[in-house]
Image (cartoon, rainbow, N blue to C red):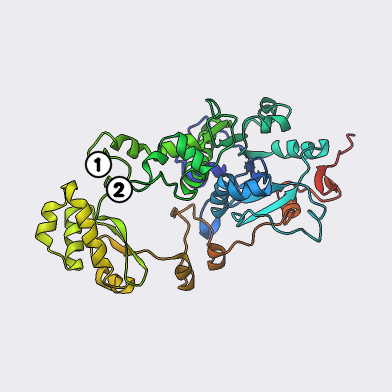
Amino acid sequence: MGVGDHDDPAVRMFGLESLGPGYKHRPAREYKEGMMGFLLRLVVRGGKEGYGMSRLHVFGWAGDVTVRARAPRAPFAALLLADYGASVLRIDRPHPRANSGTLPEATADLLTRRKSSIAVDLKSSGGIALLESILCHVDVLLDPFRPGVLESLLSSIDDVLARNPRLIIARLTGFRRDGPYANMAGHDINYLAVCGVLSQLGRTGAPPYAPANILADFAGGGLMCAFGILLALFARTASGKGQVVENNMVDGVAYLGSIMRYARKSRFWNQPRGENVLDGGCPWYDVYECKDGGFMAVGALEPHFFRQLVKRLGLPERGLLAQREDRTTWPGMKKLFRQRFLERTRKSWENIFQGVDACCTPVLEQQELEESDYEQRLPVHPDVSTGLILEHSQAWNSAGLVPGAGGLDTLEQWFGWKFGREIKTVRGGLIKIDTPKI
């Protein structure tokens, strides 16, 4: 059986050659995103663009505005899926103007590209009925809240899985679900702190330094969660069944830091923070200021790259090559490099190192990249399961997402639900209309 012979979009997405004679086709479902999670449905894009997650429907909750602005890991996981074709629906809190012709202002969430929204009152029985109706037909629920929140909304997770055996519940917390921090609030810096990674980041003689919220929220959280969802989808193509996928940012970022953990017991990283090769201690792996206030990044780890570096800096090549493995010479060598880079502007150094294998590049700022029409691209480029085009305006600006924007259209596309027939608004939140049984 070839890839193109499969009707299940998950099979096409992963490019499976064969599932064997026991494989039974199951209809494609939907994914969605929102205030407490995301639900997904996988539908394949065909034609010249190839196969992909062209109608992966993601459903979940937005939560409190301030929390969403500071905790973007779940929206980021959904954004990854959306950029490769998912249809993403976010659930917002009720608002008097949501789901109407005069929508409220956009929320603080900036990771809203290709997403739509509905406002749902999850404290009402009608809102819960709507949620449970959707869960019967979706593929993935992404739950980004602390333990117990999802359980407080649903009668039973087991019952939900029984009604929809193909459902994948991806649970993304900050701390582990067990241990002393399980029920505590936290943010990126806290997850870095308790897994040991933060202790290895920063300059010598200074406190540990957290690099914004890239490591835990995005890499150890959103990215790892999206990876877990894909693993579960892959498994489901063979078993036909979903599963619960547990993710937490402590374990996620600790896994990212595996090499840092192992390297502590080698000469590569066995010194105090800020005195090792990759953490700012090494003169040929650092950032240097230029005459005009710009910066150049140096990463000349290998001897042949280092040779080109000192040559272009106009420094004595032979003496520095002989000294580079002697850590006692590093402070003096770093001072020498610092003085030399200050003699020219960044542009001048760019010209000197352009096309040279010295691992020396300019530190470009976001504004200058945007003004130069730099092309931002999606991170992965499969030959067949292609992502969507990332327009220049989408790459550099986010208009946010208004509660209720586009959500009614999305529900009609997914389920054929029409406003006033299957759903209606009560006090600013959508609810499911009870259909009389004949």
Residue 50 location (% of width, % of height): 51, 55
Amino acid type at image mark 2:
Leu
Q: Is residue 227 visible?
A: no
Say few, some or many: other residues with alpha carbon within 10 Å of mark 1 (under 14 / 14 to 19 / 20 or more).
few
Q: Alpha-carbon neighbours of circle 2 within 10 Å: few (<14), some, or many (≥20)?
A: some
The disc label shown at residue 226, or none: none
Q: How many marks?
A: 2
Under mark 1, the amino acid is Phe
Q: List x then y, in percent, for residue 221.
A: 51, 42
Q: Position of residue 421 (x, y in %)?
A: 85, 47
Q: Is residue 128 visible?
A: yes
Of labels 1 and 2, earlier in sequence is 1
Q: Which quadrant holds the C terminus? A: top right
Task: Classify mark 1: helix, strand or loop.
Answer: loop
Q: Is residue 44 positioned above or below 308 on the image?
A: above
Q: Which residue is mark 1?
A: 268
Label 1 and label 2: CA atoms lie apart by 8 Å
Tag 1 and tag 2, C-beta contact below 8 Å: yes
Residue at 71%, 30% in the rendered image: 152
Residue underneath mark 2: 278
Residue 207, located in which quarter of the rendered image? top left
Could you say which is closer to the camera, residue 14 or residue 257? Answer: 257
Q: Secondary structure at mark 2?
A: loop
Image position of 396 (left or right of 433): left
The foreground one among 300 and 37 is 300
Q: Residue at position x 82%, y 37% from top?
A: 124
Q: Position of residue 153 (x, y in %)?
A: 73, 33
Q: Nearer the viewer, residue 73 or 88?
A: 73
